[in-house]
Amino acid sequence: MTTPKKIISHLIVLIWIIFSLIYIVYDVWSDFKSKQLNQAYQQGKIDTINTLIKEAEQCNPLPVFSDEKQIQLINVSCLQAPATE
């Protein structure tokens, strides 16, 4: 025969286990999401740098924009190259 105290203690343990599992899954999911966002950010930086390098190798001024600001970038080695006629 089970007593009401035993049923209540089992219920409390069951609720605690369910709560713990939910928290663990949430924590793992948050960590996964954070790592994926960071990886995407890092890949975006790498892609941007690679694109800038590829465009700068063509020796044409490269317009760069940020909000209202705009500048023209050019590869220094293009400026130092001897002029061809």
Image (cartoon, helix red, strand yellow):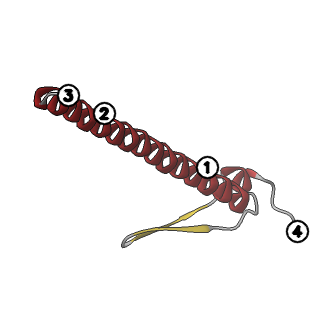
Front position in the image: 45 or 61? 45
Q: Residue furthest front?
A: 1
Left-right relation of 68 to 52: left
Note whether 7 is above or below 38 in the view shown: above
Instruction: Name the N-terminal-most of marks 2 and 4.
Output: 2
Q: Say which of marks 2 and 1 sits in front.
A: 2
Query: Which amino acid type corresponds to the residue marked 3 in the rendered image?
Result: Thr
Instruction: Name the N-terminal-most of marks 2 and 3.
Output: 3
Left-right relation of 42 to 19: right
Question: Of the numbered discs in the image, which one, if any, rests on residue 56?
Answer: none
Question: Of the numbered discs in the image, which one, if any, rests on residue 85?
Answer: 4
Alpha carbon of mark 3 to alpha carbon of mark 1: how far?
64 Å
Alpha carbon of mark 4 to alpha carbon of mark 1: how far?
37 Å
Q: Which residue is mark 2?
A: 17
Q: Which residue is mark 1?
A: 46
Front position in the image: 30 or 48? 30
Query: Which amino acid type corresponds to the residue marked 2 in the rendered image?
Result: Ile
Alpha carbon of mark 2 to alpha carbon of mark 1: how far?
43 Å
Note whether 76 is above or below 51 in the view shown: above
Q: Say which of marks 4 and 1 sits in front.
A: 1
The residue that appears at 14% across and 28% down in the rendered structure is 3
- The location of residue 51, given as percent across then percent down, is 67, 59
Left-right relation of 30 to 82: left
Q: Secondary structure at mark 2?
A: helix
Q: Which residue is mark 3?
A: 2
Instruction: Name the N-terminal-most of marks 3 and 1.
Output: 3
Alpha carbon of mark 2 to alpha carbon of mark 4: how far?
80 Å
Total count of labels: 4
Whether label 4 touches label 1, CB < 8 Å: no
The residue that appears at 75% across and 57% down in the rendered structure is 57
Query: Which amino acid type corresponds to the residue marked 1 in the rendered image?
Result: Ile
Query: Which amino acid type corresponds to the residue marked 4 in the rendered image?
Result: Glu
